[in-house]
Image (tube, rainbow, N blue to C red):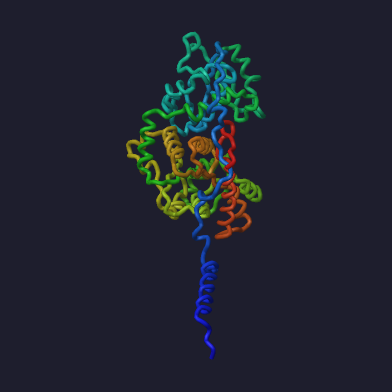
Amino acid sequence: MRVRPLFVIISTLSLFLAVVLIYPSPPVAPSKSSDSTSAKSDIWSVQRIVEWRPCKWWLQSHLTPLPAKSNGYIRVDCYGGLNQMRRDFCDGVGIARLLNATLVLPKFEVAAYWNESSGFSDVFDADYFITQMNGFVNVVKELPPEISSKEPHRVDCSKRKGQFDYIESVLPFLLKYHYVSITPAVSQRRDRYPKYAKAALCQACYRALKLTGSLEKKANKLLEAIPKPFLSLHLRFEPDMVAYSQCQYSGLSPTSMKALEAARGDDRKPWTGEAARIWRNRGKCPLTPNETAFILKALSIPTNTNIYLAAGDGLMEIEGLTSIYSNVVTKSALLSGEDFETMHGNTKAALDYCVSINSDSYMATYFGNMDKMVAAMRAFKGLYKTLFLSRRAFAEFTSRGLEGKPLMEALWKAHEDDFIKGRGSALSDCFCEFKL
């Protein structure tokens, strides 16, 4: 048998090794039995394509000088919960600048169930507000003696239908009486606001309103007590809220049903039949705590997440959440009994607001006044882990018969789209869309 020369054998081996090193074998494909969804990151890991940021035109703009003479005094009458009053007051600041009026700090008139009537200075730092608004609008704590003895001419704008125009409807009364009180309209012609009036509104809402020292101290105490990091969850499933929605719910406990029936009375009977289905599919029905927990799981929020429950008194069916997410804390549990018992509606709402604008992430099951204010302030602070859970998506998917994993996947996709595009995350008047 003929033997090859040694150099030929060595050359062959060298060539083989070179090929192996240059072209490594492909990685082993994952087993088909592996569960890819189990390792899915939470919703916050999704890359956004849009953010809402404070517009430069009011953050950095040169102020238009205030006219030398004011047209008179405006008092903004604010009603409802704290965040509704805050919204109306911010609107009132813009209106005062629009009409070249001097703003009188308001007295907050809350609904009877809050059992509280607070002045502006009981909730917000009045001196800080006046200082921050310098150059934007004239503000006074008290009226001059020649005006204070008079009752203002009242102009109720809140019930007006259609787009309300203050220049046409309020300015004539201001020029005639020199002292008017207004309740801002929900629908306003802000397209006619000059930028200096819009800037006054934005400055008031996001830079000038600061809680009083005592409230800030309580809020900081609460923030320190919450385990970190944490999600602030604004969950709305109180009897009056559910009764107002006129939605039907099955499987509620006898205690919840009794509280709900008492809240409904004779004039808030729930929809039935096809009307009930249409109403629910339009996203009009509050999510139950159990439905909320299901959506959180669909969004891959770990069940050991620290959750601060920003909610009113009397929340129903809370076990539906806490049986799945066990690390849930409340202000009543974290604050001393004496501290909590002395608080009224405005104080509790102020604490929830303060905690929520400083939380690592924020979710809400509703899109009410507090949620809009929190989302906007979080955007102002550069905090974008903010999401509104979709009642409409949940209702539509479940009405199609989706459940279990298919329902979770559909909910993920719906909320992923919302988060990517920053839907509902800020108030458009003061914020501009920024493409990432």
Task: Give residue 59's position: percent from left, percent from top.
Answer: 53, 28
For the point 60% across and 27% down, the residue is 185
The front one of 43 and 355 is 43
Task: Give residue 237's position: percent from left, percent from top.
Answer: 50, 45
Whether residue 33 appears in this view of the structure is no
Task: Give residue 226's position: percent from left, percent from top.
Answer: 38, 44
Counting every numbered tag in the picture gives 0
Q: Quadrant of residue 265?
A: top right
Q: In the rendered image of this protein, does residue 75 appear above or below residue 237?
A: above
For the point 57% across and 57% down, the residue is 409
Q: Is residue 271 left or right of residue 234?
A: right
Whether residue 188 appears in this view of the structure is yes
Q: Quadrant of the C terminus?
A: top right
Q: In the rendered image of this protein, does residue 391 appear above or below residue 72?
A: below
Task: Give residue 50's position: percent from left, percent from top.
Answer: 58, 42
The front one of 6 and 206 is 6
Q: Is residue 64 left or right of residue 114?
A: right
Q: Residue furthest top?
A: 146
